[in-house]
Image: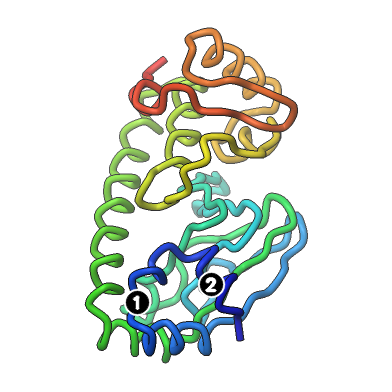
Amino acid sequence: MISEDELRRIAIWSHDLAPEEFEEARRGTTTRVYGKGAYVCHVGDRLESWTGVADGLLKMSTTSRSGKSATLAGLRGGAWFGEGTIIKNEARRYDLVALRESKVALMRRQTFFWLFEHSAAFNRFLVHQFNERLAQFIGLAEYDRMLGATGRLARNLAWLFNPILYPSQDRTLTISQEELGLLAGISRQMANQSLARLAELGFIKVGHNEVTILDLERLARYEG
């Protein structure tokens, strides 16, 4: 069972729950730590939990029959995902890999459905979540075909600061060039060059294993 303080820290949606709803969510949620490179789930797995990122960084990806891998999304602390899989009771359609040691929150399926059936606040959150994820994947289909390496990195980085999916107000993210390259599907060297270009444009500030967003709107629209 997760503590009250930790649930409030990692789940912005919990702030709007009624006391009995919050307690139900807390009782039905546990946490687990995954090492760097560990799979949280594989394509075809049936997980009985709605999933959140308490700490760390995960990559959601898929691999075609020909062996080509594509990153669908990066997931940092505060992200919750997999509600569609839970509602439709289907196998996962993606691999989920920890890019660094990560702490993951797991809400029981029964608890998820209890909130789904009893909490208006929880359902409002899910509606916003579905809308943002839809926009994200439509955007992915567009920029994966049309943008170069710097543009892909810019879009992936911008999505990690989406205010609905990742509600933290902190504009600085601890992330390595290797991790950014894995998210954007480019090499570490290309990630380094792309970060330098985005910093030159004034969109970001690059520090040691961290990136600070200076202009999120322009970063999200960059097509270079």
Residue at the spot of label 2: 7
Other residues around mark 1 within 10 Å, as few (<14) / some (14–19) / many (≥20):
some
Q: Is mark 2 on a helix, strand or loop?
A: helix
Relative placement, left or right, of 117 versus 146 is: left
Q: Residue furthest top?
A: 200
In the displayed structure, 45 sits above or below 210; it is below
Q: Is mark 1 on a helix, strand or loop?
A: loop
Q: Residue at x 51, y 22 (%)?
A: 149
Query: Are the two marked residues, 2 and 1, in contact with CB atoms closer than 8 angstroms?
Result: no
Question: Is residue 48 shown to the viewer in this render?
Answer: no
Nearest to the observer: residue 69 or residue 199: 199
Q: Residue at x 54, y 8 (%)?
A: 200
Q: Residue at x 55, y 14 (%)?
A: 199
Percent position of residue 117, x then y? 25, 87
Q: Which residue is drawn at 53% across and 72% down?
A: 7
> Could you tell me which quadrant the N terminus lies in?
bottom right
Other residues around mark 2 within 10 Å, as few (<14) / some (14–19) / many (≥20):
many
Percent position of residue 102, x then y? 69, 59
Q: In which quarter of the image is residue 206?
A: top right
* Distance CA(mark 2)–CA(mark 1): 12 Å
- Numbered mark located on residue 17 in the image: 1
Q: What residue type is labelled 1?
A: Leu
In the displayed structure, 63 sits above or below 80; it is above
- Numbered mark located on residue 138 in the image: none
In the displayed structure, 205 sits above or below 39; it is above
Question: Is residue 24 shown to the viewer in this render?
Answer: yes
Q: Earlier in the sequence, mark 2 or mark 1?
A: 2
Percent position of residue 76, x then y? 56, 51
Relative placement, left or right, of 135 versus 192 is: left
Nearest to the observer: residue 42 or residue 10: 10
Q: Which amino acid does label 2 sit on?
A: Leu
> Could you tell me which quadrant the C terminus lies in?
top left
